[in-house]
Each structure stands twice: as C-alpha cells, then as structure tokens.
C-alpha cells in the first residue's frame, strides 16, 4: 500500500468519532466481518487506528478504497462542509431524459480526465437515485491532493446539483461543464443559495418542505395553531390586544405555514441603496452615491427565528418580504439596489 | 353683620378689600346652593338607573324560570330527541366514509380555506400505490400553493400548458404521468425484491424508472446463459417500455435455440409488465422441476 494512501486512510479514520466507528466501517464494507472481529475497539484511538491501517494494508487498499471511506465520512458529517446549489437548464423541446447512471459516471469521469492529467474521481450511489461524487484535484505535475476534495451530490433527472464550496475556484467551470454534459443539460448557473445543511437545501430546492395536506383521510386532525407562544397572558390584556395578537398569529401562520421550517443558518443582504432618513439631515442623507453595506442574519435555525419575530413582539407582522421570500425564491444571498 | 358698602372713598384699598371679601362670600354661598341642586339631579339619575337595573334583573329571572320550566316539561321526550341525534350522527359518519373512500377513484379533493387540495392516488394492476397532493389556490390566475409531486415529474410543463386554460386536462394529465411513474416503480421494486434470485448483479435504474438495465438468468439454477436486458421507457405516460434490447454477454455466437429465447424474451419485456415476465420464468422453472421429479 502506497505511503500516501496509508497516511490518507489513517487520517480519515482518526477523524471518525468512536461512537460512529463501527457504523462507518461497516458501510465502507472493505474490511470483512472476521477482520473487524479481530480488532479490540476498546483500545486507545491511536492504537486502534494503527491496527485498522494494518488490516487495510493486508487487503491492499488503494486510493479508490480510501476515497470511498472519505465519502462515507463526509456523508455522515455533511454539515462540516458548506454546500452551494447549482441549477442546470436544457434547451426547450428536448426529448425525455433517459438517464443512465453508468453512462453519466463514465462521461463525467472522462471529461475531467481529458482536461486534467491528475484528477481522481470516486462515485458512491445514494438513496433516491442520487450519486455522491468525490473529486481530488491535481495539476500537470502534482498528484491529486486528497485533503482538499470537492463533493458533488446529484439526484438523477433533476436540474440541480449540490457542490461543496471549495477554495479552488479554478476547478468550478470544469466541474460545471462535466456535470452539464454528463447529465445532458446545456447550461449551469450557480444559485445564490448556500448552507451547511445539505438536507435543507434539498428540501427547499425540491419543494419538499411543506408536506402537510388537507384530505378527508387525515388520521391526525389539523393541529391547533400553536406557534409555541406563552399563552399565560396577563389577564389585563383585554379585547384590543387579543385582536392584534390573533392577527399576528394568523399572518405568521399564512406566511410560514404549520410545518417545521427547513434549517438554514444565515441570510445575507448586500445593499447598494441610497441612504433614506426621516430627519432629512446629516451627512449620509446628502450623499448622491448609494451606500454600500452588508447585512447578515445568523441563527442556529434562521427561518424558525424569523417565524417567531412577530409573535414575540420584536417585529411587525407581516415581516418584510425580503426575509420571508427565502424558501420560495431559493435564495439566501441578496443584492439590493434602488429601483 | 352688614358690611359697609363698597363705594367708600376714605376706605381706599381697605374698603376695596372688604367689598372683595363680601363678593367672595356671596359667590361661595351661591356655589354652596348649586351643588345641592346638581347633587339631587345626579341622585335622581342614580335612582332611575337602579330601578331600571332591578326591572331588567326581574325580567331575566322571569325568562330563565320560563326556560327551565319549559325544559322540565320537555324531559319525557328526551329519548325521542336522542335517537334523532343518533340518526344524524350515523348519517354524518356515512358521508365522511364516502368522502374518504373517494380516494379509491384515483382523483379526489377537499375544499380548503383558500381553494382545494387535490389527492391523486396511484394504482397499478389493482394495487393501491403512493398518493400525491396538489394544493391549489383559487385565484386569478389559478396557482399551486404547494405539492408533493416528485421533482423529476414535469409538473411545471403540464401546469404551463393546462393549469390556466383547462383544469380538468391538467389534473388528468398529471394523473397519467404519476400513475405511469408509480407503475414503473412498482415493477422495478417487484423485480428487485421478489425475483432477486434471477438477477446476476444490481438492477440499474433512475429516478423516473424509465431506464432499467440488468443481467439475468431465466433459469437461475440451470445452465442458461446470462442475458443483459436494457428497457427504455421513452413515453413516460406508459408503464410498458418503448425499446427493449436483450443481448448475450459472451464471445461465442448463440445457438439457434438460445437466439430464439433471446428474441422471445425481448418480445416478452415489450408486451408484459416486468415482474410478470419474471413470474412466468419462475413458473417455467417450477414446471421443469416438476418434470424432473416425475
């Protein structure tokens, strides 16, 4: 086994938390049951890793096996990467897409390998007819760098691809081209939509986040419209305030729905607008040029936080459409200019 | 004691002050008398309101007593009322069940506050499969609020063509696509689960289940050659393939009997659902086994 491969496997296994070790190794399916049984998992991690690497050595693990282990680790820890969403388009009036996974994989690999001498591509099939692709980039003279790979998650016969953000900006056009050609599309465009939570991006882009429907067959009755507010209101809050509170609840429920919001962690607004002031005084109000500033909203769960703003009394209902349009527009990066 | 009059010159400011005090006294006396009048007016008002309140209370009590006495007189007929209620309840349950059963027609809906939620229940060969939903907002223009249609079904295309002009056509077209997809998926799932023994490798499929590729042996136990089948469903509103190629994975040419089999398999895959083709292989296997026994 190559020293580089051995080191790579060692470092990958070291990253795996002990609680997940067995699950990930079984998913890898490279070391057999009997081999795994010879390992004492109660050892200290370093020595356990050493034993595992020895076993891999025995089985002559190659760079592809190591790459597969890396994919599995990343699938378990997908939130450690930041994912961009790309949208592909076809020419109108094209025939139905007869997607052949084998053809897609070979076409994708071929396009990359034709353009770059040193590139390693690994595939792993996933559920829902999707594929995870791992690409390690090299140069004319250097072997692929296994520690800075790019990941692509593609669901067959959809126009979207999820690509892990990487510093290697130069690789993106080639990657885009390979994806487009292999999946029989014509153009690829990066959407202004980015998050660590790949599953949320998928739910929003595939419009799968609102899945409660009113039917005659509903076994559970429509839940009480409870936005989780503290209903122990002061008994001195009388008629007028109750009307307003109900209105806020109703408006919030109309905009955000009854479902749990998909999890995003930020929204960013780049403003290039003229400064507007009520006072009509001050240096800023007299500027002719637009004021440039960046507003970033961060939260462990941004959409849930936005949903709770009006009921908590922090903001007026309805909220600004710039905040509430995030799932519908599939955007969380905005550029706002004066009309 | 009478105070001196006001116009005494030698008094000067003193006389003015006395006169002023006199005036103040007269004013306060007046004020003292006035409230008494106002007081009595308010007092009258209070008395009137009180008597009105008492009258209203008496009226309320009278009416309540009337109602309870009426209820008491109605008591003996309670049993009759309850059974009427029972009848209505039963009717209501009946109607609810009928509404629930509508899903078996494949296309049903429920009115919502903003429009209608349409349920499309797919089926294949009498098996009820997945249900999909489209929540429509009845406005001009008609729009889809949210749905559970998979992303690879061309919903936007169908909506662009028919949603505004012919809602019926929209729904029927969507039904067609979804039922065909469900049917193809059902066949592929059946092949993978029930006839895995016939497959010599994983079944290759895609999201729409419109391209299936697999290697199989018509007789898993016997000496038959493995064939490679490639099924293309170019019309995604149908559950049978449009193109089928069955090839032989080998270098030697096939004997005529095998060639005949290969051609007949191609025909079978074109005309019968996938899992039924394999079911017929299985039956043939059984027959052969039976022949060997006797």
Image (spheres, coloured by chain):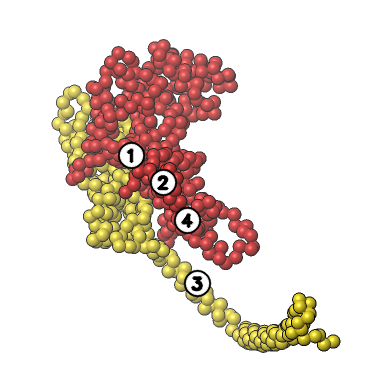
The residue carrying mark 1 is A191
Disc 3 crowd rating (10 Å Cα; few below 14, some 14-19, many 20+) is few
Point out residue A153 in the picture as x, y percentages from the top left corner. 35, 34
Point out residue A298 in the picture as x, y percentages from the top left corner. 48, 40
Q: Are marks 1 and 2 in contact (CB under 8 Å)?
A: no
The residue carrying mark 3 is B89
The colour with which the image depicts chain A is red
Label 1 vs label 4: CA separation? 29 Å
Using the image, name the chain to which the residue with label 1 belongs. A
- Mark number displayed over residue A317: 4
Front residue of A151 and A310: A310
Using the image, name the chain to which the residue with label 4 belongs. A
Relative to A5, say whether B49 is above or below.
below
Visible residue check, residue B282: no
Disc 2 crowd rating (10 Å Cα; few below 14, some 14-19, many 20+) is some
Relative to A55, say whether B196 is above or below.
below
- Residue drawn at 41 percent across, 46 percent down: A285
Point out residue A108 in the picture as x, y percentages from the top left corner. 27, 28
Q: Are marks 4 and 2 in contact (CB under 8 Å)?
A: no
Label 3 vs label 2: CA separation? 69 Å
Front residue of B276 and B18: B18
Of badges 4 and 2, the one in the foreground is: 2
- Residue drawn at 16 percent across, 26 percent down: B253
């Amino acid at each position: 086994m190559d020293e580089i491969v051995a080191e790579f496997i060692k470092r990958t296994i070291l990253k795996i938390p002990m609680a997940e070790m067995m699950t990930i190794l079984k998913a890898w399916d490279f070391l057999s049951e009997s081999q795994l049984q010879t390992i004492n998992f109660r050892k200290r991690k370093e020595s356990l890793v050493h034993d595992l690497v020895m076993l891999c050595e025995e089985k002559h693990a190659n760079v592809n096996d190591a790459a597969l282990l890396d994919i599995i680790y990343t699938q378990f820890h997908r939130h450690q990467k930041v994912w961009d969403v790309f949208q592909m388009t076809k020419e109108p009036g094209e025939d139905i897409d007869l997607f052949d996974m084998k053809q897609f994989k070979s076409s994708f690999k071929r396009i990359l390998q034709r353009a770059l001498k040193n590139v390693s591509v690994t595939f792993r099939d996933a559920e829902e007819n999707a594929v995870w692709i791992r690409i390690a980039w090299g140069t004319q003279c250097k072997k692929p760098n296994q520690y800075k790979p790019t990941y692509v998650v593609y669901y067959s016969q959809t126009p979207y691809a999820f690509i892990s953000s990487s510093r290697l900006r130069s690789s993106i056009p080639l990657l885009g081209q390979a994806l487009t050609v292999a999946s029989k599309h014509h153009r690829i465009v990066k959407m202004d939509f980015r998050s660590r939570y790949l599953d949320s991006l998928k739910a929003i882009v595939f419009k799968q986040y609102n899945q409660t429907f009113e039917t005659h067959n509903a076994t559970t009755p429509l839940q009480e419209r409870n936005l989780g507010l503290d209903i122990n209101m002061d008994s001195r809050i009388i008629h007028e305030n109750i009307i307003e509170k109900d209105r806020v609840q109703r408006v919030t429920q109309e905009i955000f729905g009854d479902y749990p919001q998909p999890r995003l962690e930020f929204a960013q607004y780049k403003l290039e607008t003229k400064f507007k002031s009520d006072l009509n005084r001050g240096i800023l109000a007299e500027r002719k040029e637009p004021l440039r500033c960046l507003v970033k909203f961060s939260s462990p769960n941004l959409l849930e936080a936005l949903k709770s703003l009006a009921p908590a009394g922090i903001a007026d209902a309805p909220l600004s459409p710039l905040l509430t349009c995030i799932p519908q527009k599939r955007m969380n990066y905005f550029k706002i200019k004066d009309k | 004691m009478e105070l001196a009059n006001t116009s005494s010159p030698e008094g000067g400011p003193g006389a003015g002050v006395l006169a002023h005090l006199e005036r103040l006294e007269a004013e306060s006396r007046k004020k003292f008398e006035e409230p008494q009048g106002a007081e009595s007016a308010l007092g009258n008002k209070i008395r009137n309101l009180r008597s009105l309140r008492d009258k209203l209370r008496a009226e309320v009590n009278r009416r309540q007593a009337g109602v309870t006495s009426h209820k008491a007189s109605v008591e003996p007929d309670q049993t009759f009322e309850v059974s009427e209620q029972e009848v209505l309840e039963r009717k209501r349950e009946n109607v609810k069940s009928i509404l629930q059963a509508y899903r078996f027609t494949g296309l049903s809906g429920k009115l919502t506050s903003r429009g209608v939620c349409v349920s499309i229940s797919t089926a294949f060969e009498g098996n009820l499969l997945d249900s999909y939903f489209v929540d429509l907002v009845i406005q001009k223009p008609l729009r889809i609020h949210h749905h559970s249609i998979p992303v690879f079904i061309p919903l936007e295309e169908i909506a662009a063509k028919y949603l505004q002009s012919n809602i019926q056509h929209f729904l029927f077209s969507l039904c067609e696509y979804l039922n065909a997809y469900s049917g193809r998926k059902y066949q592929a799932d059946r092949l993978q689960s029930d006839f895995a023994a016939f497959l010599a490798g994983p079944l290759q499929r895609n999201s729409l289940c419109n391209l299936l590729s697999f290697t199989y042996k018509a007789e898993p136990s016997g000496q038959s050659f493995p064939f490679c089948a490639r099924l293309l469903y170019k019309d995604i509103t149908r559950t049978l393939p449009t193109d089928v190629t069955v090839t032989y994975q080998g270098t030697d040419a096939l004997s005529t009997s095998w060639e005949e089999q290969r051609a007949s398999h191609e025909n079978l895959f074109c005309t019968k659902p996938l899992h039924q083709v394999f079911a017929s292989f299985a039956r043939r296997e059984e027959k052969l086994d039976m022949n060997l026994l006797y």
